[in-house]
Amino acid sequence: MIIMNNLRERKTYRVSVIILLIILCFLALIVATTFGTYKLSFIEVVKAIFYEREGMNRAIIWSIRFSRNIVAGLVGMCLALSGAILQGVMKNPLASPNIIGVSAGAGLAAISIMILFPHLTYLVTPMSFIGALLATMTIYILSWKDGISPLRVILSGIAISSFIGAGINTLLIFFPDRVYGVVDFMVGGLSAVGFKQANLIWPYAIIGLISSIIIAKKLNILQLGDDVAKSLGVNLELTRFILIALASLLAASAVSIVGLLGFVGLIVPHIARMIIGSDYRYLLPASALLGALILILCDTIARTILSPIELPVGIIMAAIGGPFFLYLLRNGIKGRTN
Amino acid sequence: MKRTNTKIITLFLVVLTMLIFMTGCVQETVEATVENEQILNEQDESAIVKESLIVEETDTILTFKDVGGELITVKKNPSRVISLYNSYLDSWYMSGGEAVGRVSGTTGVPEEAMDIETVGKWSQPNIEAILALDPDMVIMRATISKQRAIEDQLKANDIDTCYVDYTTFDEFLQVVEVFAHITGDASVFEETIKPMINNMDKLKEKVADIEGPEALVLFSTSKSLSIENEEGTTGAIVNELGGNNIVKENVAEGKTRIDFSLETIVERNPEIILIKTMGNIDDCKNTLEVNAMSNEAWNEIDAVKDGNIHYLDKNLFMYKPNKRYFEAYLTMAKLLYPNENFSEFDSEVAN
């Protein structure tokens, strides 16, 4: 009876946290759309979104600020989900989109185009997406030996990322006069993104969210160990392949739009785990919402702190997120993790 | 007969004395004229170069300040010079210098220096290749860390390091003055700089009473909106010609390109957009329209509504124009004031 009450209490807490995160995401979207370089009252912002169809207020609030916040939310969601899935499937707290070669693959593809074929830079987004997926597939194939072990995936990932990194560094050294723009991509930022980019990424975010609801139970089973998972009828290889493919798809879609924004995929799932525990049925949606929330808020700071000059959001993420994560590690919500 | 001889000798001596005196006078006059010319040249230079970098000069040594205020001392009239930045090699040749080595690439390289030895890339100079050419001075760009890194090795081999850096026209003149004093050839001021400045003054005078447009100088990258403020080469030309560069903000001294808020660009509403590109203009146009300028908010800007968007010639606005500075100014004047007739200046453009 006591156990049942505890479980019910824990479930209520987790559902409450998710509802709270949804509310916070909406609040963050409102706050982020209200504040910017161009000063407008809240009423003017509401008018610009719901009533006006043209004019400067509409252009700034709707086409620039609101659309950018939507992209920030979707990117945060995709990266955090990707990181949470990878940490689960690899059973490694250091797993992130970087480890499966997403960043390296996308980086090499994007930087090659920017440096070697600057006249084709409109291909940066699709090619970095393809590069990310190719790198992930290479790592997956190289780590296959009578099946996939998480350790081999991580080690292959480190080796391939290092190899690709050598290619990136060679390009940067041989073409230093063309690196402008490359730095922006490597730091990661949301400058000049809008509805066009939102249209590119929202299908992946929706697919990721729906899939995470479906696969959450299997991720929970994987945490019990391979033998238990097998005994419960889980096809280990197929499940791992699907999970890694999903994670790489999510991360590749985000990276191709904002650049190598690595911090979200690593830290946000840990923060979510500290708040809501390790049950993937709650952890995945919580990570997605927290990723969206953090990226919207950090991007708001990035575009307003030195206004009208903008900072790449990657810098703000690292500057605020790092110490905050350390604070949570030392003083986090005790007793809520299992 | 004896008296006649004495008279002749006396006359000869008088004539000789007069000749010596006159020669002395003429020589003194010539020296005075040369001195006057030197003074004149120095006066001209000081009128042209607003804030000279030169701190001290002797017959053999020149000491000047680099961009960071550090004092640089070099021996004058070096015979074997290497330039690690091709745009500065061009300025060096303009100032009467010659070189035995340069870095790879052809942009900015003067015709006479095309076939000299190369010593690596400007970002990665090869110290062995430099030492193999046995130079007595190396021209370097003060802000490139890889060039700074070889300074100790150069100095250990008794090679002078001549650090320079310039972005604007006034800074270019400062560097040309330094170079001219090192080579000992001031003719660049008379032959190139003075006509250039005269033409620029006439050009500025012509547009002085016309209200210049609000201008945005955009640097084309695939991902971010990079803007050049009024301290950059192009931004400064816009302002000098009476235009108003809408971006005056900066993050640090000397940083001319910044990531800027699209909101603020729409709010400040430029009448003309000038785009600097590194590659083919048609390709860059396509890239910019697909990526950075894809947001529909651009359509609210007057420059976009009027189609007043111009892609700038990289040789004049991306790289150092050096002797083509006036051409850069004239090109910009034509873009800023399309209704004005500048044909009287076309013949002044350097080939």
Image (cartoon, coloured by chain):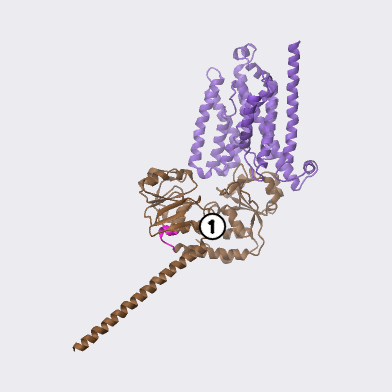
Chain colours: A purple, B brown
Q: Picture coordinates of residue B230 (x, y %)? A: 60, 53
SS under mark 1: helix
Q: Is residue B185 magenta?
A: yes
Residue segment shown in magenta = B180-186
Q: Picture coordinates of residue A288 (x, y %)? A: 68, 28
Q: Picture coordinates of residue B220 (x, y %)? A: 59, 47
Toward the viewer: A244 or A64? A64
Looking at the image, residue B277 lies above or below residue A137: below
| Occupied quadrant, residue A240 | top right
Quadrant where the N terminus of chain B sits is bottom left
A107 vs B266, left or right, is left
At 53% from the left and 44% from the top, the residue drawn is A178
Does residue A179 appear in the picture of this structure? yes
| Occupied quadrant, residue A189 | top right
Does residue A204 appear in the picture of this structure? no
A48 vs B112, left or right, is right
A168 vs A317, left or right, is left
Q: Picture coordinates of residue B157 (x, y %)? A: 36, 46
| Occupied quadrant, residue A148 | top right
Residue under numbered circle 1 = B169
Q: Report how many numbered discs are placed on residues in the image.
A: 1
Looking at the image, residue B310 lies above or below residue A275: below
Mark 1, other Cα within 10 Å: few <14 / some 14–19 / many ≥20 = some
Q: Amino acid at mark 1?
A: Phe
